[in-house]
Amino acid sequence: MTTPHVDSVKTYAAVWIALLLMTGLTTGVAYIDLGAFSVVIALTIAACKMALVALFFMHVRHSTKLTKLVVLGGLLWLAILLSLTMADFATRGWLGA
Amino acid sequence: MVSEPRVETLALREQFNTAEQQKDASSLGMWIFLITEVMFFGGMFAAYTVYRSIYPGVFGAASRTLNATLGAINTAVLLCSSFTMALAVRAGQLGRRKQIMAFLILTLILGMVFLGVKGYEWNEKYVEHHIPGPAFHMEGAGLQDHAQLFFSLYFAMTGLHALHMVVGAGLLALLLYQTYRGRFSAAYYTPIDMVGLYWHFVDIIWIYLFPLLYLIDRHGPRP
């Protein structure tokens, strides 16, 4: 049996600190008026945090190609769910009453 | 043939060629389960996106009534618990039984702290009449019904998230018992790894819930 990739405590600690800093950043930036741009920033920071948790804590970077494909496929289906739903709601008014 | 009570161990089951293949299959199965969970929560995120796009002002005002400081603290608590869970899995990889127990206990405690803070916040909502229903009342918002939509989503999403935390806490307690009984070693720690994946997934859901519920429009006027 091949030994698993054992990441160092240092690596995990660095990811943990980065996650805490990004939590502070997303909280702080919410108090600044950026108009419609603030939701973009909030979601970008959340996506970065998700990527760190998935790649390091959930070991996706050491996973098999099949597992990586399943993870990306899942995100793709979520994107389809959200974008098709919004494509409907955003365009309902176009035809008039 | 008298067989001992069947206990799953590191033993390679007959449908697999190698222990590595067996472990990869477990990981893949867990990920596919997590993807179904993503779609489950995804439906609620879709409902949230639709209503927030229709009533952005009311959602912003309702969001400002939430306690962002407690929300941020709870986010940090949950991230710390993910860190300790990752270290528990690492201890599993190295077969260090005492370390596994220590990190599982820490993770469990942090999970309980999260749920405690959440319970305190829910009680605040009760006191402020922010629970959807006949007693609902929100100061300032002209559109009570639309504010109730926000709080319905708030309770559905944080409630379902908290339910996942409770399930996770139960799984951690089970792992603690099994680790205490000496079930895991460097050669077999798959259950710790799988519960770790679940725990981190629940963390990721909260990573999105926190800004989407608490931080919609913090710079606007306080109600």
Image (cartoon, rainbow, N blue to C red):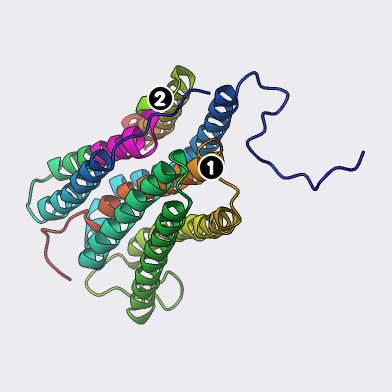
Mark on residue A72?
A: 2
**Could you say which is closer to the camera, residue B173 or residue B3?**
B3
Q: Position of residue A7 (x, y in %)?
A: 32, 35
User: Is-magenta flag for residue B45?
Assistant: no
Instruction: Categorize mark 2 by other alpha carbons within 10 Å: few (<14), some (14-19), many (20+).
Output: few
State which quadrant residue B14 falls in.
Answer: top right
Q: The N terminus of chain B appears in which quarter of the rendering?
A: top right
Residue plotted at (20% across, 51% down)? A20
User: Is-magenta flag for residue A53?
Assistant: yes
Residue plotted at (67% across, 29% down)? B12
Disc 2 residue type (three-letter): Leu
Q: Main secondary structure of the magenta part?
A: helix
State which quadrant residue A69 falls in.
Answer: top left
Q: Position of residue A53 (x, y in %)?
A: 32, 40
Q: State the CA–CA distance, disc 2 to disc 1.
A: 31 Å
**Could you say which is closer to the camera, residue A29 or residue A85?**
A29
| Mark 1, residue position | B185
Q: Which residues are magenta?
A: A46-60
